[in-house]
Amino acid sequence: MKIHLASIFVDDQYKGLEFYTSKLGFVKKTEVPIGEFAWLTVVSPEALDGVELVFEPANHPAVAPFRDALVADGIPFTSFAVKDLDAEYERLVGLGVEFTQPPTVMGPVKTAVLDDTCGNLIQLAQMLEDPSA
């Protein structure tokens, strides 16, 4: 058994697609129109046949209170692994991405948290070989 799909709620599926492809660097994998929405996924360019991230419409009434509570408490909805967090942070800041937490060492991991412009906080994480780095 393996993870095939992961979902993230977005206010607007195509705004999500734009941010996740043009800023974060993911690649569109699937787009199937379904009524007013679409089955819309992206993947990492490093794993084109890997786990797909599904842009779920955030129109269910339970979504807004859930996401609002996470954002208010500064809790990321999900986390993406990066090899060099400092370089990725600088690249994304240069593209206008807003961070709620700059790169911060937390034991064996360095993390940063960004606003995905679609209602979510997203954590970027780099595992450290030397936690004092």
Image: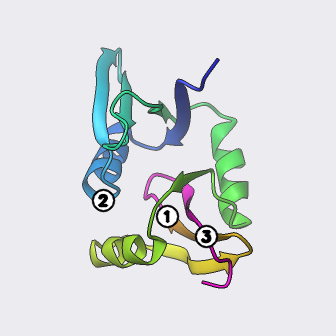
In-front residue for pair 105/32: 105
Q: Is residue 90 above or below residue 78?
A: below
Quadrant of the drawing holding the N terminus: top right
Q: Earlier in the sequence, mark 1 or mark 3?
A: 1
Mark 2, residue position: 23
| Residue at the (65%, 50%) spot, across then down | 67
Answer whether residue 53 is magenta in the image.
no
Mark 1 and mark 2: Cα distance apart in space: 12 Å
| Residue behind mark 3 | 128
Bounds of the magenta segment: 115-133
Q: Is residue 10 left or right of residue 111?
A: left
At which x and y percent is residue 112?
A: 56, 71
Type of the residue with mark 2: Lys
**Mark carried by residue 115:** 1
Q: Secondary structure at mark 3?
A: loop
Q: Residues within 10 Å of mark 1 (few under 14, many from 20)?
A: some
| Mark carried by residue 30 | none
- Where residue 32 sits in the image (x, y, percent)? 30, 17
